[in-house]
Image: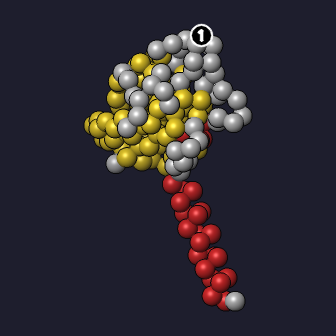
Amino acid sequence: MKKIMLMAIFCLGMVSVANAQAPKVTAFNQYNEDYPGELACDGDMETRWATQDYTDFKDMWLEMDYRKEMTFSKVAIEEYQSRITRFQIQYKVGEEWKVAYEGTKIGQGFEQSFPAVTSRYFRLVILERADKTWGPSIWEIELKK
């Protein structure tokens, strides 16, 4: 019985350590309650963040708060149906957002390096999309060292 309890405590400790690494996520908008922003950072390729369809607005974003300063120099993104045509990876310095990387299409298997930046806050900003009918959607985004 002691061994089982110790294993349970160890596993719960591992979960809380793993969750401490995951960022707090805020999305500019979401399709509905089934597609919140945090699904883009949950490590599950069967869940995703989706923005609203038929919406005529620019600058859709997904913000990641790591709760402490982190240094990253690479981003990996898996996009649903290649709807994004221009985007930026930004990081916050004081109250100002700066651009770490700007690109065009994402699609599946996107990975890009950029000069290392340090901040507590990072975000994916969608500047343009291919079709104003369908909103962009992200399976996963991961910032890496």
Please tell me whether residue 80 is drawn above or below residue 16 in the rendered image.
above
Q: Nearer the viewer, residue 93 or 106?
A: 106
- Left or right: residue 20 versus residue 76 is right
Q: Residue 56 placed where, x, y %? A: 59, 10
Dot 1 falls on a residue whose secondary structure is: loop
Please tell me whether residue 28 is drawn above or below residue 44 in the rendered image.
above
Give me the residue at 37% from left, 46% from top: 144
Q: Residue 47 placed where, x, y %? A: 59, 42
In the picture of the structure, the residue carrying the numbered disc 1 is 56
Q: Nearer the viewer, residue 112 or 115?
A: 112
Give me the residue at 66% from left, 26% from top: 31
Please tell me whether residue 128 is drawn above or below residue 120 in the rendered image.
above
Could you tell me if residue 109 is visible in this image?
yes
Q: The disc labelled 1 sits on which kind of residue? A: Asp
Give me the residue at 41% from left, 34% from top: 108
Give me the residue at 48% from left, 21% from top: 83
- Left or right: residue 81 versus residue 55 is left
Q: Residue 23 placed where, x, y %? A: 54, 46
* Residue farthest right in this picture: 33
